[in-house]
Image: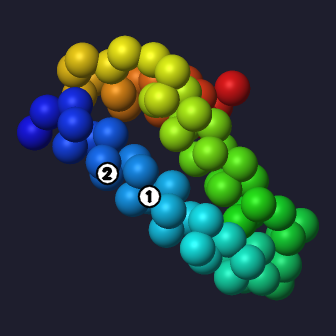
Amino acid sequence: MDAAFFRAWLAEAASAVESHRDHLTQLDAAIGDADHGINLARGFGAVSAALDQTATPTPGSVLVLAGTTLIS
């Protein structure tokens, strides 16, 4: 597995989160504050933007960038 694999995997995850954003928010409404889908979509959108703007030549650099973006 190379950096391209992880970049593609994160792009697929972002797409899945976006397409299920409303459902995730509805699920969260039952036990939380109804913002989970919105927050996940915002976070993965930020990851996608960061990956578009940053060179990530190794799998580790892709994952570190994704992780630090999500927690920031």
How far is the residue under mark 2 from the one under mark 1?
Answer: 6 Å
Q: Which residue is mark 2?
A: 9
Badge 2 marks a residue whose secondary structure is helix
Q: Residues within 10 Å of mark 2 (few under 14, many from 20)?
A: few
Res 38 quadrant in image: bottom right
Which mark is drawn over residue 13?
Answer: 1
**Does 69 sit left or right of 3 as displayed?**
right
- Against 62, residue 12 (above or below) is below
Residue 28 seen anywhere in this rendered image of the structure: no
Rendering coords of residue 15 (x, y %)? 50, 62
Q: Give the position of the C terminus as an image quadrant.
A: top right
- The amino acid type of the residue labelled 2 equals Trp
Residue type marked 1: Ala
Q: Is residue 34 left or right of residue 66?
A: right
- At which x and y percent is residue 28? 76, 74
The percent position of residue 3, horizontal first and vertical second, equals 22, 31
Residue 40, placed above or below residue 69 = below
* Quarter of the image where the N terminus is located: top left
Residue plotted at (60% across, 76% down): 20
Label 1 residue SS: helix
